[in-house]
Amino acid sequence: QVQLVESGGGLVQPGGSLRLSCAASGTIFSINTMGWYRQAPGEERDLVAQISGGGSTTYGDSVKGRFTISSDIAKKMVYLQMNDLNPGDTAVYYCHVESRDSGWATIDYWGQGTQVTVSS
């Protein structure tokens, strides 16, 4: 059974920084991407950043230049360095893994989420 466990969320003042970590456990046949999504109250879950097994990265427009995603695919770890945070970044942040099974079917895994609150 695959589990994703996030850590590093919390309360931070505007302009501050946080680093999120996500550890995946269990057997994953092959990882396509690891990444982060976020969901604020009353809004849809949106992509924050993702990184492929080959190291290619994608960022949401609102976080470009402020957030940096990194990973250790072999260890099934993904990180999100968040700088220059603002109240608009307040949300629950979810770790996500897109994988393939031995039959090449896509499987999505999600963490439970970690709250990030940006407030003075």
Image: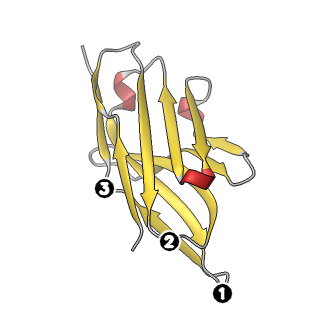
Residue 82, percent from left and from top: 47, 27
Is residue 29 or residue 52 the one in the foreground? 29
Amino acid type for the residue under numbered disc 3: Gln
Secondary structure found at label 1: loop
Pick whichever, 51 or 58, lies toward us.
51
Query: Is residue 23 placed above or below 26 in the rendered structure?
Result: above
Give the Cα separation between the discs numbered 1 and 2.
Answer: 15 Å
Q: Which residue is drawn at 35% across and 14% down?
A: 14
Q: Give the crowd class for mark 1: few <14, some 14-19, many >=20 residues within 10 Å.
A: few
Task: Give residue 112's mark.
Answer: 3
- Marker disc for residue 103: 1
Q: Which residue is drawn at 36% across and 47% down?
A: 6
Q: In this view, does 27 lie to the left or right of 41?
A: right
Q: In this view, does 100 lie above or below 112?
A: below
User: Could you say which quadrant of the image residue 1 lies in?
Assistant: bottom left
- Front in this rendered view, residue 61 or 18: 18
* Three-letter amino acid code of the residue under disc 1: Gly
Dot placed on the residue nearer the N-terminal end, 1 or 2? 2
